[in-house]
C-alpha cells in the first residue's frame, strides 16, 4: 500500500470519486486536499480525471460485460470498479492482474470480504471479453473497440458500441462519454472527421504549457534552466510557449517562484496575441480572474501599459493579485467590480477591453472534466445572455478606434460567431477586425479549443 502511512494512488482516487458529484462540485478541489496522502500524485490525478472524463464509456462496459446495470451496484463499490475498468481500458501498460489485485485490496479496506468476490468477478468478466488492450484503430472493429488515442483502442470480443456508419452521433457520444446533443451539433457544423478529432481532444490527458514571462526571461533561457533541472520540455512552433514533457508539480518547477512563467494553454494565449497590446495603451480586463490573460496583457507591451483588472468574484480577484506579484508586474491595478464605474471615470475611456467571458467550456472538456456533466442547451442560452450583456458593457468603455478582444474557451457558435454577429447588427459603430475559432487537438502539440474576435470602434462620425 505504499510506504509508511501513505496511501496508494488508487485509494486516494476512489475517495475523491466517492465525494465528487461532477454535476454539483469539483474533483480538483477535493483532490488538492488529499493529494498529500499519497506519494503517487501524478497517478492519483490521472485516475480521478481519467475516470471522470471516460465515465460514460466505462459504465457501458461494466453494464454490458458484468450483466449488471451500474445503478444496481453499491456506490462505494462502483467507483472501485470504475477505476479498475478505466485502467484496463486506457492504461494498457499496467498489468491486468495488478489492476484486479489493487481493486480487491481497496474493496477489503472499505467493504469486507464478501464484496471483494463481487468486485473481483466483475473485473474478471470485463478482462475475459477484452481481446486486445491496445490495438491500432485502423485494424480494429469499431463496434468492439473503445478508442484510447487517435491511433489506438482497447478491443473486445463482442460488439457493444453503436454502429459508426449508421449512427455516428450515438457511436461518438457513447465511446467518448459526451452528451449526444453536443456531438450532434458538432457533426452538423464540423462534419464527422473533425468531430472525431474534437472528441479525442476532449478526452486526452492534456499537456502542460507554460508562457515565459518576457519581463524576466526568454524561451531559450527558460528551456535551458528546465533542462538543467532534468525536466524535458519543447518550445511551441512560434517560440512563445513551452510544453513540459516531464510530469512535475508546477510550483516545484525551476523559475516558478521567481515569476519566470505562467501556466497557459496555447489556444488561450492567442486572444491577447491577436489584440497585440501596445506600450502606453490604457486597458481594462473585465473578467480578469485568475489573471492568466491579465498578466499576458501586461507582459506583451513590456509592462508599459496601464491596465485595470476587475472580476465579479472578489475572492478570485485575489488570485490576480498573487499572479501579478509573483511575476513582478507593475502596470496592473486590481479593482473591485463595484468600484468599476468610478475608476472608469478616472482612467477611461480605454484603448482596449479584454473580455474573456464565462462560457460553456466546450473547447476545454479535457481540463474542465465536470463541464460535460453540466453543459446543456439551456445553460448555453443563459450564458449567451450574460456574454451579450458583458459585451454591451465593454462597448461603452472604449475610445474611438478602441478595440474589444472577445474570447471564450467554447467552440459553440451561439457563444462565438453568432453572438458577435448579433452585437455588430445592434452596434453599427463597431466592425469586426478579425476572428479565430480553434478546435481542440489531441495530436502532436495538443491544445484546447477556443474563440477570439477583435472588434473595433469606428470614429463617432458614422
Image (cartoon, grey):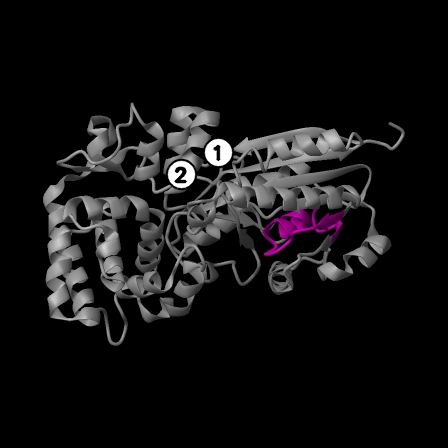
Does 137 appear in magenta? Answer: no
Vertical placement of residue 338 versus 217, above or below: below
Residue at (45%, 63%) from the top-left corner?
Answer: 29
Residue 356 can be seen in this image = no
| Numbered circle sitting on residue 201 | 2
Where residue 333 appears, x then y in whole percent?
73, 59
Residue at (74%, 38%) from the top-left corner?
Answer: 403
Vertical placement of residue 15 versus 409, above or below: below
Q: Secondary structure at mark 1?
A: loop
Please report contact status of discs 1 and 2: CB closer than 8 Å, yes or no. yes
Residue placed under numbered mark 1 in the picture = 439
Q: Which quadrant holds the C terminus?
A: top right
Vertical placement of residue 442 versus 218, above or below: above
Per the model, the C-alpha gap separating discs 1 and 2 is: 9 Å
Residue 24 can be seen in this image = yes
Q: Residues within 10 Å of mark 1 (few under 14, many from 20)?
A: many
Residue at (63%, 52%) from the top-left corner?
Answer: 295
Residue at (22%, 31%) from the top-left corner?
Answer: 143
Magenta range: 283-307
| Res. 259 image quadrant | bottom right
Where residue 248 appears, x then y in whole percent?
39, 57
Total number of numbered discs in the rendering: 2
Which of 161/304 is in front?
A: 161
| Res. 389 image quadrant | top right
Which of 412/41 is in front?
A: 412
Q: Residue furthest right?
A: 461
Would you say 323 lies left or right of 50 here? right
Q: Secondary structure at mark 2?
A: helix
Does 290 appear in magenta? Answer: yes
Where residue 152 appears, x then y in whole percent?
25, 35
Q: Residues within 10 Å of mark 2 (few under 14, many from 20)?
A: many
Amino acid at each position: 500500500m505504499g510506504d509508511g502511512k501513505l496511501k496508494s494512488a488508487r485509494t486516494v482516487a476512489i475517495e475523491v470519486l466517492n465525494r465528487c458529484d461532477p454535476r454539483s462540485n469539483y474533483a480538483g478541489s477535493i483532490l488538492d486536499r488529499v493529494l498529500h496522502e499519497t506519494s503517487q500524485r501524478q497517478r492519483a490525478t490521472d485516475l480521478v480525471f481519467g475516470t471522470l472524463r471516460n465515465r460514460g464509456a466505462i459504465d457501458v462496459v461494466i453494464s454490458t460485460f458484468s450483466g449488471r446495470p451500474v445503478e444496481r451496484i453499491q456506490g462505494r463499490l462502483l467507483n472501485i470498479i470504475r477505476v479498475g475498468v478505466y485502467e484496463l481500458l486506457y492504461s494498457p501498460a499496467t498489468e491486468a492482474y495488478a489492476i484486479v489485485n489493487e481493486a480487491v485490496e481497496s474493496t477489503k479496506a472499505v467493504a469486507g470480504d464478501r464484496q471483494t468476490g463481487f468486485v473481483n468477478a466483475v473485473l474478471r468478466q470485463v478482462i475475459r471479453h477484452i481481446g486486445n488492450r491496445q490495438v491500432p484503430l485502423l485494424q480494429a472493429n469499431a463496434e468492439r473497440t473503445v478508442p484510447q488515442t487517435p491511433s489506438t483502442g482497447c478491443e473486445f470480443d463482442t460488439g457493444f458500441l453503436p454502429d459508426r456508419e449508421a449512427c455516428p452521433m450515438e457511436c461518438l457520444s457513447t465511446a467518448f462519454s459526451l452528451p449526444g446533443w453536443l456531438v450532434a451539433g458538432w457533426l452538423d457544423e464540423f462534419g464527422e472527421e473533425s468531430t472525431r478529432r474534437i472528441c479525442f481532444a476532449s478526452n486526452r490527458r492534456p499537456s502542460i504549457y507554460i508562457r515565459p514571462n518576457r519581463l524576466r526571461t526568454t524561451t531559450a533561457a527558460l528551456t535551458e534552466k528546465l533542462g538543467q533541472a532534468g525536466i524535458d520540455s519543447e518550445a511551441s512552433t512560434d517560440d512563445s510557449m513551452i510544453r513540459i514533457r516531464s510530469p512535475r508539480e508546477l510550483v516545484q518547477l525551476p523559475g516558478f517562484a521567481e515569476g519566470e512563467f505562467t501556466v497557459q494553454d496555447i489556444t488561450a494565449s492567442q486572444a491577447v496575441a491577436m489584440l497585440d497590446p501596445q506600450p502606453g495603451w490604457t486597458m481594462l480586463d473585465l473578467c480578469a480572474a485568475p489573471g492568466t490573460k491579465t498578466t499576458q496583457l501586461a507582459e506583451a507591451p513590456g509592462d508599459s501599459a496601464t491596465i485595470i483588472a476587475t472580476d465579479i468574484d472578489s475572492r478570485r480577484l485575489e488570485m490576480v493579485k498573487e499572479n501579478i506579484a509573483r511575476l513582478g508586474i507593475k502596470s496592473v491595478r486590481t479593482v473591485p467590480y463595484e468600484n468599476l464605474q468610478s475608476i472608469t471615470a478616472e482612467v477611461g475611456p480605454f484603448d482596449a477591453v479584454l473580455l474573456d467571458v464565462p462560457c460553456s467550456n466546450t473547447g476545454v472538456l479535457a481540463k474542465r472534466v465536470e463541464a460535460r456533466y453540466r453543459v446543456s442547451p439551456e445553460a448555453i442560452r443563459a450564458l449567451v445572455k450574460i456574454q451579450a450583456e458583458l459585451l454591451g458593457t465593454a462597448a461603452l468603455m472604449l475610445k474611438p478606434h478602441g478595440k474589444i478582444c472577445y474570447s471564450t474557451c467554447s467552440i459553440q457558435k451561439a457563444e462565438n460567431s453568432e453572438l458577435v454577429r448579433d452585437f455588430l447588427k445592434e452596434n453599427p459603430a463597431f466592425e469586426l477586425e478579425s476572428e479565430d475559432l480553434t478546435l481542440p487537438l489531441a495530436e502532436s502539440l495538443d491544445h484546447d479549443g477556443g474563440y477570439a474576435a477583435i472588434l473595433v470602434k469606428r470614429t463617432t462620425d458614422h
